[in-house]
Amino acid sequence: MGDDNILYYHKVLGHLIGKNASKYHGKHDKKSMTKFMSIDYIYDRSLENKETYAKDIGKHFGLNKSTTSEMIKSLQSEGMIEMIVDSNDARLKKLVLTNNALNLVKQERTLFEEFYSQVTNNLTKEEIETYINISKKMIENLKEED
């Protein structure tokens, strides 16, 4: 598998994103990128008056149930989220951001925007849209059947 293979570039890009993201996210409590993006996802959904459950996080980020559960437990122990029993179904627990998480979102969004600008520097809007569309197709190709 040489450097003419899309998987090669995906691996290198993923490694470099992780390495460079830690420079930005390391400035505030060293949250992993997935944890921060999960907090950000819950925040965005709350702005739309949508409730968020563990299954939503797992589905959105392509995580299996055990990985999702571990991450949620970690976020809960770090004081970033609370789990509130759903009033319509006691088996479900809504994920609600704490004030700590809300403060983190405010701090991290600026850093994330700086990082995003670094990653997308020299790309046109059309190139970014093409990359996103191709990535969505590849994600769909690899999604596991529920």
Image (spheres, rainbow, N blue to C red):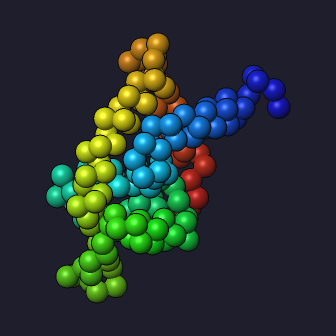
Q: Where is residue 103 drawn, in percent x and y? A: 25, 52
Image height check: is 72 above or below 12?
A: below
119 or 126, which is in the foreground? 119
Look at the image and tell me in which quarter the N terminus lies: top right
Q: Is residue 137 visible?
A: no
Q: Give the quarter of the image for residue 124.
A: top left
Residue 55, by quadrant, is bottom left
Q: Is residue 52 above or below residue 40?
A: below
Q: Is residue 18 found left or right of 113 in the rendered image?
A: right
Q: Position of residue 116 (x, y in %)?
A: 42, 29
101 left or right of 124 in image: left
- Comparing 100 with 81, the one in front is 100
Q: Position of residue 136 (x, y in %)?
A: 49, 39
Residue 20 in view: yes
Indicate whether 74 appears above or below 129: below
Residue 8, by quadrant, is: top right
For the point 34% across and 85% down, which residue is it? 91
Q: Identify the residue at image location x=48%, y=65%.
A: 71
* Residue at horizontal 75 percent and vertical 22 percent from the top: 4
Report the front residue among 106 and 133. Answer: 106
Look at 53% across and 59% down and name the residue there.
63
Q: Is residue 135 above or below residue 79?
A: above
Q: Total label count?
A: 0
* Extreme-bottom residue of the structure: 90
Q: Residue 104: give x, y in percent of width and height.
A: 31, 51
